[in-house]
């Protein structure tokens, strides 16, 4: 029998985890809420546990010591390292895919093989584990290529080339010089696609697929999509490109065949699957799969969820998603990320954050990412510091509200894009 009240642990410390925690905190089903390690934002609604999520023995010990009934995993690293398998072995309930299923994110060569075998639309690609073979292949290409380290590289392992020759430099850096360490022992070299991007998240258990509301991420640091790639500088939900027919196509031509392909490899996917798509002239094509909620996408999708997130994720983890229902707020959500000066390169931390609580309203959410509580107040503690999300009747209304709130928050060196959700 499932316990009436659930003590819940959320693993991770970003804006995604604060957004998940804020929603779980509203559930009547919640007993006590814990975050590991969490941030200053989660500390105000949960008990932060100072445990390193990569130390599986310590995570299991903390889950037992705190009588956790249900664990939700935010980031990919613990999933790809097999935290779900460990919890299952211990008889503990956890939301997320097993290590074998998480390879869809953790091994881009594996994901490409699954997609190719299942005829899932994706960029034309070749996989190499020898530098010379990769270079020979690239020399035959006369269009721009994208070079990807196959393993996990904290979102940085993708080099998008403007000219064919740049792919040669990229494989030299990744395979020859070890730019991304072991993650780059194998590379995927693929054609560069063109078109707008859209992120589609789906909850998945053994029998059911629930496609969630869509989002669009702003990956580049600067306005007009200039500057380096980042973890994400803002987001809007729904994506202006989402249509029912597109989502139907994504479910039937991408998600279902991919899950079938995984089954043929002997694994069943449970958890949330993130499908990163490019809408090309030839239809939607997969750029990547992630085995977790996106960040900052979660910071715009979850505030629009009207249903009980805890019940939903608990049902999914227990293979009972078909009994669940999901209701959405029709409003648009816009999130503006405030980052430390210098991010995604070097930046300093420990800056005092002012104006955090000046704008308390029910349609604005200040999600913490790299923040830490300090006796003297909240301080910066990471690259992406805050995600300021607002709900509005239109993209323009949500955008205006989000930027009004951003304008009230100050820390030394704060940087953010000024064009999130502009010109929609
Ligand atoms: P990924 O981590 O594989 O999603 O790649 C990060 C970013 O690189 C994506 O969000 C795209 O903006 C870009 N990208 C990845 N693959 C391609 C591709 N085949 N063509 C064009 N851009 C790509
Ligand atoms: N926003 C991109 C990601 O979560 O991977």
Image: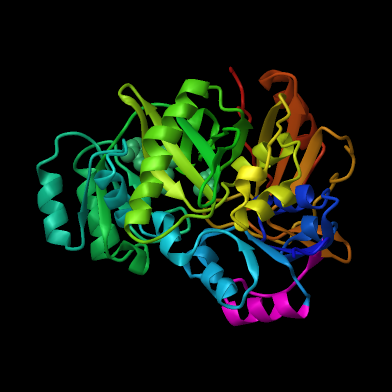
The image shows residue 44 at horizontal and vertical percentages of 85, 57
Q: Quadrant of residue 173?
A: bottom left
The image shows residue 51 at horizontal and vertical percentages of 68, 75
Count of all numbered marks drawn on residues in the image: 0
Which residue is drawn at the image coordinates 65% and 72% (left, top)? 92
Is residue 423 depicted above or below 310 in this figure? Answer: above
Image side of residue 306 versus residue 319, left or right: right
Image side of residue 219 versus residue 400, left or right: left
The question of residue 50 being in magenta is answered with: yes
For the N terminus, the quadrant is bottom right
Image side of residue 73 versus residue 116, left or right: right
Which residue is drawn at the image coordinates 68% and 81% (left, top)? 61
The image shows residue 203 at horizontal and vertical percentages of 57, 45
Image side of residue 404 versus residue 242, left or right: right
The question of residue 245 being in magenta is answered with: no
Q: Quadrant of residue 50?
A: bottom right
Viewer can see residue 412: no
Render colour scheme: rainbow
Which residue is drawn at the image coordinates 31% and 38% (left, top)? 122
The image shows residue 33 at horizontal and vertical percentages of 80, 62
Front residue of this view, candidates 265 and 242: 265
Which residue is drawn at the image coordinates 59% and 47% (left, top)? 295
Front residue of this view, candidates 386 and 286: 286
Viewer can see residue 110: yes
Magenta residue span: 46-65
């Amino acid at each position: 029998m499932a316990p009436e009240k659930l003590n819940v642990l959320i693993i991770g410390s970003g804006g995604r985890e604060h957004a998940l925690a804020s929603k779980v905190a509203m559930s009547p089903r919640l007993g006590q809420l814990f975050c590991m390690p969490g941030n200053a934002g989660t500390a105000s609604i949960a008990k932060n546990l100072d445990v390193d999520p990569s130390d599986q023995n310590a995570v299991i010990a903390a889950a037992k010591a705190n009588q956790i009934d249900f664990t939700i995993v935010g980031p990919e690293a613990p999933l790809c390292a097999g935290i779900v398998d460990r919890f299952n072995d211990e008889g503990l309930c956890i939301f997320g895919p097993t290590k074998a299923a998480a390879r869809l994110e953790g091994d881009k060569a594996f994901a490409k093989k699954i997609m190719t075998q299942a005829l899932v639309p994706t960029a034309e690609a070749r996989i190499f584990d020898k530098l010379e073979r990769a270079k020979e292949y690239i020399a035959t290409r006369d269009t721009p290529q994208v070079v990807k380290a196959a393993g996990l590289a904290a979102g940085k392992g993708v080099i998008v080339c403007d000219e064919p020759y740049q792919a040669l430099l990229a494989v030299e850096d990744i395979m020859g010089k070890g730019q991304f360490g072991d993650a780059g022992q194998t590379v995927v070299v693929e054609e560069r696609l063109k078109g707008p991007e859209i992120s589609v998240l789906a909850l998945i258990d053994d029998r059911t697929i629930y496609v969630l509301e869509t989002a669009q991420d702003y990956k580049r640091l600067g306005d007009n999509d200039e500057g380096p790639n980042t973890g994400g500088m803002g987001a809007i939900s729904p994506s202006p490109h989402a249509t029912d027919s597109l989502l139907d196509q994504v479910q039937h031509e991408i998600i279902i065949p991919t899950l079938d392909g995984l089954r043929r490899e002997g694994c069943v996917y449970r958890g949330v699957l993130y499908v990163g798509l490019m809408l090309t002239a030839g239809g939607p094509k997969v750029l990547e799969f992630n085995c977790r909620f996106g960040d900052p996408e979660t910071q715009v999708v979850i505030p629009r969820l009207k249903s009980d997130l805890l019940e939903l994720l608990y049902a999914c983890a227990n293979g009972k998603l078909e009994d669940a229902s999901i209701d959405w707020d029709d409003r648009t959500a816009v999130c503006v990320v405030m980052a430390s000066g210098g991010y995604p390169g070097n930046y300093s931390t420990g800056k005092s954050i002012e104006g955090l609580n000046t704008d308390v309203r029910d349609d604005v959410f200040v999600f913490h990412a790299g923040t830490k509580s300090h006796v003297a107040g909240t301080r910066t503690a990471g690259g992406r510091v805050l995600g300021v999300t607002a709900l509005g009747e239109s993209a323009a209304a949500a955008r205006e509200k989000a930027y009004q709130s951003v304008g009230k928050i100050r820390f030394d060196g704060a940087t953010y894009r000024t064009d999130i959700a502009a010109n929609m």
